[in-house]
């Protein structure tokens, strides 16, 4: 009996060897990040850049957020640009996070970050949006990307894709 207690005490009191787990993400070929050059997919059934968003009653008598005037090109004087998305069915709450970046623009350095936005989605949510208001200095004309991340927040945010659009001088877009 004494041997049993000694073995039991050893199991609970002595440290067990730890097995290292890789905390790094798998490497991607040719230095690509793996998500910047593809449109988000998977949980998104639709994701588009738009001039606005509107909440409407869906076919299942639930509210849905739909894009208003989807576009890949915006005038430099628009007050706000939206990324509107519809989701596949999901079983937990999570956040959709967007990082707004000017890839190549007039008067700003390459890959200049303009801002971020986040939306918390509950299990019953079927759609949502993130947006960014026009900077005080205006939208620089150029090529933009919104890097999309998903997760529960903080450091648990995984990249899922990028939505791209262009901003043109106000007179150039009709």
Image: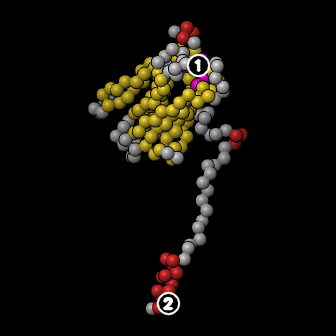
Considering the numbered disc 2 on the image, is that residue within a helix, a strand or a loop?
helix
Considering the numbered disc 1 on the image, is that residue within a helix, a strand or a loop?
loop
Residue corresponding to mark 1: 140
| Residue 12 in the image: above or below residue 5 | above
Image: magenta residue range: 139-145
- Find residue 10 and report its horizontal and vertical position in percent: 52, 81
Q: Which mark is residue 171?
A: none
24 magenta-colored: no
Image coloring type: secondary structure
Please identify the quarter of the rendering in which residue 119 is found: top left
Please identify the quarter of the rendering in which residue 167 is found: top right
- Find residue 36 and report its horizontal and vertical position in percent: 60, 35
User: Is there any visible trace of residue 40 in the rendered image?
Assistant: no
Q: Residue sitting at 59 percent across and 34 percent down?
A: 38
Task: Give the number of callouts.
Answer: 2
Q: Residue sitting at 54 percent across and 18 percent down?
A: 138
Q: Which mark is residue 3?
A: 2
């Amino acid at each position: 009996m004494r041997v049993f207690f000694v073995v039991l005490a050893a199991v609970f009191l002595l440290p067990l060897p730890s097995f290292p787990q890789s905390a790094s993400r798998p490497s991607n070929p040719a230095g690509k990040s793996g998500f910047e050059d593809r449109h988000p997919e998977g949980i998104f059934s639709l994701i588009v850049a738009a001039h606005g968003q509107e909440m409407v009653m869906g076919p299942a008598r639930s509210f849905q957020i739909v894009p208003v005037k989807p576009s890949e090109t915006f005038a430099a004087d628009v007050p706000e640009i939206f990324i509107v998305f519809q989701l596949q069915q999901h079983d937990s709450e999570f956040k959709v996070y967007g990082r707004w970046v000017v890839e190549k623009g007039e008067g700003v350095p390459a890959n200049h970050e303009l801002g971020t936005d986040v939306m918390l989605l509950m299990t019953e949510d079927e759609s949502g949006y993130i947006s960014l208001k026009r900077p005080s200095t205006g939208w620089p004309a150029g090529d933009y990307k919104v890097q999309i991340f998903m997760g529960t927040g903080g450091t648990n945010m995984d990249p899922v894709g990028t939505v791209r659009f262009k901003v043109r001088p106000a007179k150039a877009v009709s």
